[in-house]
Amino acid sequence: MKRIGVLTSGGDAPGMNAAIRAVVRAGIYRGIEVYGIYHGYKGLITGNIKKLEVSDVGDIVQRGGTILYTARCEEFKTEEGRAIAIEQLKKFGIEGLVVIGGDGSFMGGVKLTQLGFPTIGIPGTIDNDIPETDFTLGFDTALNTIIDAIDKIRDTATSHERRFIIEVMGRGCGDLALWSGLADGAESILIPEKTEDIDQICDRLSRGLERGKRHNIIIVAEGVGSADEIAKKIKEKNNMDTRVTVLGHVQRGGSPSAFDRILGSRMGSKAVELLLAGEKGKMIAIQNNHIVAHDILDLLTKKHDFNESLFQLAKELSI
Ligand code: ADP
């Protein structure tokens, strides 16, 4: 293999740039050429492809987002769209591809692999919703962004003796809510993996009030529903006023944490190593601090492991 490509697809995540840099430099270090494909699969179809040199990925390891831009591309979901993509890859002489993105992007990669084009995935999403990896790229940074925001909200919650409901991202996965809730000592954490009765939350709020606790932090994962709805229910049941903060896209941005920079670097380098070893249809993962690879088709049939013990711990510590 003499020439490979790299693209970012789906939602952006901090650490993607570190992974791009690693793919480019690990490739060049091993004597191959690396091409950047811009705007995800859309760029693959339109031929928005450019050779990347060592200096093109300088000064990006500390930057959030992705220098290759990202996009969603409906056309790539069609056979015709993928046929055009393969043509483009052939035209540029690209023989292998690294796809940095979420499970949707991996499906796209698998389809290319099935057409005989080797693809390796790197899990880049703040949601931590990918099976068989302890962490996805961007999760740690998003978690720290959330914690920073909650700390600030807590200051005002304490000063004004208010109850705050904070809605965080994660799609169908509750990890951002659970980990930030534990890290920030939230009184309640609502996640899709554990449907907690609104009555239980209201009881806890009442018990707290009896003990003289007049401020509370409740974290809601977006996969559970809207924080406004929860606020309405608490008002109906307990006649308690709450303030709602939806953190939104601030969670996706920012300079990547040291953890995500290192994770991106390790995963990017491993992806190149695997492509050069003739591997395909695999996703890079981190498990017990080891960088490993799993068959994508296999892991797409699985669900990300829910950390029950962390949930229990958060509950225990918020009595
Ligand atoms: P994520 O990768 O973050 O899960 P999406 O699910 O939006 O994001 O997928 C990103 C892109 O991957 C889509 O816009 C599409 O181009 C491609 N993709 C997703 N699912 C498939 C599929 N089943 N077949 C082919 N391509 C797909």
Image (cartoon, grey):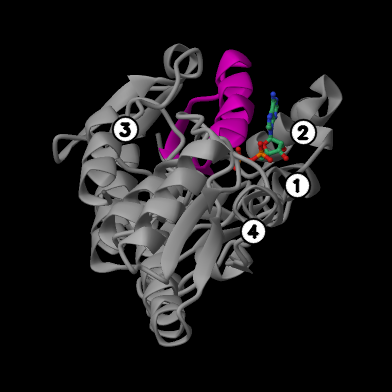
Left or right: where 11 falls relative to 267: right
Q: Nearer the viewer, mark 4 or mark 1?
A: 4
The residue pinned by badge 4 equals 239
Q: Quadrant of ligand 1?
A: top right
The one of 219 and 211 positioned closer to us in this rendering:
211
Left or right: where 231 falls relative to 261: right
Q: Assign a secondary structure to mark 4.
A: loop
The residue pinned by badge 2 equals 76
Q: Position of residue 196 (x, y in %)?
A: 49, 33
User: Do callouts 3 and 2 mark residues in contact (Cβ within 8 Å)?
Assistant: no
Residue 106: in sight, yes or no? yes
Q: What's the CA distance linking mark 3 and mark 4?
A: 43 Å
Residue type (three-letter) at the residue carrying disc 1? Lys
Q: Residue at x 45, y 29 (%)?
A: 194
Residue 27: in sight, yes or no? no
The residue pinned by badge 3 equals 133
Quarter of the image for residue 298 reads top left
Q: Position of residue 210 (x, y in %)?
A: 36, 60
Q: Earlier in the sequence, mark 4 or mark 1?
A: 1
Q: Assign a secondary structure to mark 2.
A: helix
Binning the other alpha carbons within 10 Å of mark 3 as few (below 14), some (14 to 19) or many (20 upward) gives many
Compared with 22, 224 (above or below) is above
Q: Nearer the viewer, mark 2 or mark 4?
A: 4
Question: Residue 42's mark?
Answer: 1
Q: What's the CA distance linking mark 4 and mark 1?
A: 51 Å
Compared with 167, 157 (above or below) is below
Residue type (three-letter) at the residue carrying disc 4? Asn
The one of 168 and 15 positioned closer to us in this rendering:
168
Residue type (three-letter) at the residue carrying disc 2? Phe
Q: Does the beta carbon of the residue at mark 2 sit less than 8 Å from ligand 1? A: yes
